[in-house]
Image (cartoon, grey):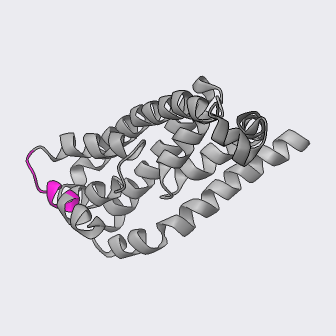
Amino acid sequence: MLHRLYMRTLALAASPRAPWWLAVVSFAEASCFPIPPDALLIPMILARPDRAWRLAAVCTVASVAGGALGYAIGYFVFDQLMRLPLASALFGSDPLGAFQAWYARWGLAVILIKGLTPIPYKIVTIASGAAQFSFPVFMVASLVTRGARFFLVAALLRVFGSPVRDFIERRLTLVTSMLAAGIVGGFLVLRFL
């Protein structure tokens, strides 16, 4: 079923309304949709390299806007779920408070790492809302990391074209994870010096 959904999403890249579909998929992926926007972004850039920057911008803006929806889901839904008696029975008297304290300390690092990598962004958007992490910091970090990620894909495809597609699909997680680790490491060095 997921493969069929992926193939359908990929077919949207050939549609005349492909940029709109890219925005819809990018928005939805940030809160609930299982297919990453790369499924549309990559073939669209390969078909029209002259539109690479504009497509990366559409992807970034829509993804960050969808991230705000994911944040709202986490903020409002998890707060209500953690008030249920079953949550206290399973996780202790204040499971949400413990999670929020941990996220207040490490949330920015989590957003930077998850926002850059192809790991589902919806995890960090919902978790950030559940932790009631600072919304302005969340939005700025999301804009920076999602933009960096999508513009990196656009740059690689624009410069190297189709041969880099296989590399992106297989190794982008490794490259962006190393980049994210470097950024987080830099913040940690600055914080403790």
Residue 180 visible in the shown view: yes
Give how far across and how far down residue 180 sits, in percent.
63, 54
Q: Residue furthest left?
A: 16
- Where is residue 119? Give x, y as percent: 51, 58
Q: Looking at the image, which residue is at 83% across and 42% down?
A: 190
Task: Establish if 57 lies above or below 39.
Answer: above
Image-quadrant location for residue 30: top left
Query: Is 165 left or right of 184, judged from the image as shown?
Result: left
Task: Give the residue displayed 84% in from the left and 48% down from the top.
Answer: 189
Occupied quadrant, residue 140: top right
Residue located at (48% from left, 44% from top): 146
In this rendering, would 132 be left or right of 36?
right
- The foreground one among 150 and 32 is 32
Q: Name, please, the residue furthest toward the right.
A: 193
Query: Is residue 144 among the parts visible in the rendering?
Result: no
Question: Percent position (x, y) of residue 69?
Answer: 43, 31
* Residues in magenta, as a range: 9-16
Q: Position of residue 109 (x, y in %)?
A: 69, 45
Q: Identify the image quadrant of the C terminus.
A: top right
Q: Would you say 95 lies left or right of 39 here?
A: right
